[in-house]
Every structure is written in C-alpha cells, then in structure tokens.
Amino acid sequence: MNLLLIRLIIFAVLFFAGLKLYRMYREWKLDRDGPQQGGDDQGNRMVRCSWCQVHLPEDDALRERGDWFCSGDHRDKYLAEQKEEKKEEQKEENRQERDD
Ligand SMILES: [Zn+2]
C-alpha cells in the first residue's frame, strides 16, 4: 500500500546522497588541483604584465620579446612606449654629437 511512498523516499535519499557525493568529489578535486596561485611544477607559472604589473598564469599571458603581458592592448602600449624611449635616446645621442 505504501510501496510507492517507500520507493519515493528511497529515490529521494539516493538522489541527495548522489548530490552530496558529487559535491564531495568536486571539493576533493579542487583540493587536489589546488588554487592556481604561485608557481607549481605543472607549468602554471605566474607571470607579471610589464605594463600594469598584474600577475596572471603563464597560460593566459602573451609573450613579446621576453616580456609578459595580460592583454594585447597592454603589449601594444608597452611596445609603443619602448619605441618612444628609443627615439628619445637617439635624440639625446644626436644632441651630444652636436655638442662635441
Ligand atoms: Zn596588463
């Protein structure tokens, strides 16, 4: 008579047990993988954007001439600034040559 009710309860218990197991598994997996901070040996090294100094995983960073960047925008800004600095240096050199 109450067979259907008992089946429903068993089903519900199994469902919540499965849900709990799934959550436990996820937490265990997070613990095992660890937070993605600090360098570890699995290639998830943290690098610093040369423009805004923000730290990010090497996988998400862009590399240009030995420098790391968080985005193409910051790479372009940094390289543009470096070009400006080079121009300034050349101007300085030209001035010095003229002075001599
Ligand atoms: Zn940046």
Image (cartoon, helix red, strand yellow):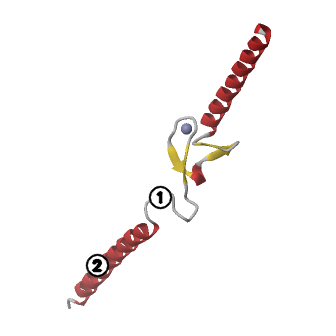
Q: Residue at x 74, y 11 (%)?
A: 95
Secondary structure of the residue carrying tag 1 is: loop
- Asked if residue 96 lies left or right of residue 59, the reply is right
Toward the top, the furthest residue is 99
- Asked if residue 54 lies left or right of residue 73, the reply is left
Relative to residue 32, is residue 93 depicted above or below? above
Q: Amino acid at mark 1?
A: Gln
Toward the left, the furthest residue is 2
Camera-side residue: 9 or 75?
Answer: 75
Q: Amino acid at mark 2?
A: Ala
Residue 89 place in picture, x, y as percent: 71, 21
Residue 72 place in picture, x, y as percent: 64, 38
Q: For the C terminus, which image quadrant?
A: top right
The residue at which mark 2 appears reads as 12
Camera-side residue: 42 or 23?
Answer: 42
Q: What crowding class fits label 1: few (fewer than 14 Cα within 10 Å), some (14-19), or many (20 or more)?
A: few
- Asked if residue 100 lies left or right of residue 3, the reply is right
Q: Residue at x 65, y 27 (%)?
A: 81
Relative to residue 93, is residue 29 depicted above or below? below
Instruction: Please tell me in which quadrant of the rendered image residue 2 appears.
Output: bottom left
Relative to residue 77, is residue 3 depicted above or below? below
Q: Residue at x 57, y 35 (%)?
A: 51
The numbered disc on residue 36 is 1
Instruction: Please tell me in which quadrant of the rendered image residue 73 appears.
Output: top right
Q: Residue at x 64, y 36 (%)?
A: 75
Separation of residues labelled 2 and 1 (CA atoms)? 36 Å
Toward the front, the furthest residue is 100
Q: What crowding class fits label 2: few (fewer than 14 Cα within 10 Å), some (14-19), or many (20 or more)?
A: few
